[in-house]
Amino acid sequence: AVIVCAGGLTGPAVAGMNRRFLAIVSAGVLGFLLTLLYDLLTNIGAFFFLTGTRELSGLIKFVGAGIMFMGLHLLWNTALFVGVLKPMLNVLLRYRREMSGQ
């Protein structure tokens, strides 16, 4: 729900940016931060669910074991947001205008 809410709040701002470079950088930063938040929350949740313990040292080891996947996930999603977010939002905005009769 946090990720969807963040997209709903920031999507129109990114779509409305006239400077392409600023929109691309904003989309990349947004993609990186949202993916980082998602990965941290899912890793922490998986640790507590799978181990049944609340030791901080165990959590650090658990997250550290998945750091390679997390890094690849961050790179991929950042690249995806950079390349796709602005054009996709522009298309959605155009369809919204067409459907509303503007």
Image: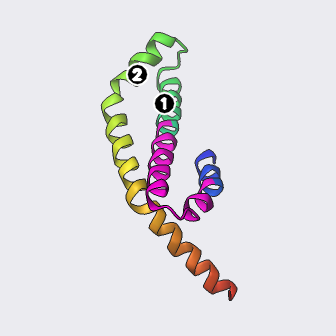
The residue lying at 47 percent from left, 68 percent from top is 88
Q: Is residue 19 magenta?
A: yes
Residue 60, numbered circle: none
Left or right for 69, reference 88? left
Circle 1 SS class: helix
To which residue does mark 1 refer? Answer: 46
Left or right for 12, reference 47? right
Q: Residue 46 at what x, y percent from top left?
A: 48, 30
The residue lying at 51 percent from left, 75 percent from top is 91
Q: Residue 7 at what x, y percent from top left?
A: 59, 54
Q: Is residue 28 magenta?
A: yes
Left or right for 9, reference 24? right
**Amino acid bearing label 1:** Ala
Circle 2 SS class: helix
Residue interval drawn in magenta: 10-36
Determine whether 13 is above or below 94 in the image.
Answer: above
**Amino acid bearing label 2:** Phe
The residue lying at 53 percent from left, 30 percent from top is 45
Determine whether 99 is above or below 75 in the image.
Answer: below
Q: Residue 8 at what x, y percent from top left?
A: 64, 57
User: Disc 2 vs disc 1: Cβ atoms closer than 8 Å?
Assistant: yes
Q: Nearer the viewer, residue 94 or 41?
A: 94
Distance (Cα) linking label 2 and label 1: 9 Å
Determine whether 50 is above or below 17 in the image.
Answer: above
Q: Main secondary structure of the magenta part?
A: helix
Rate crowding at label 1 as few (under 14), some (14 to 19) or many (20 or more) other CA atoms within 10 Å.
some
To which residue does mark 2 refer? Answer: 62
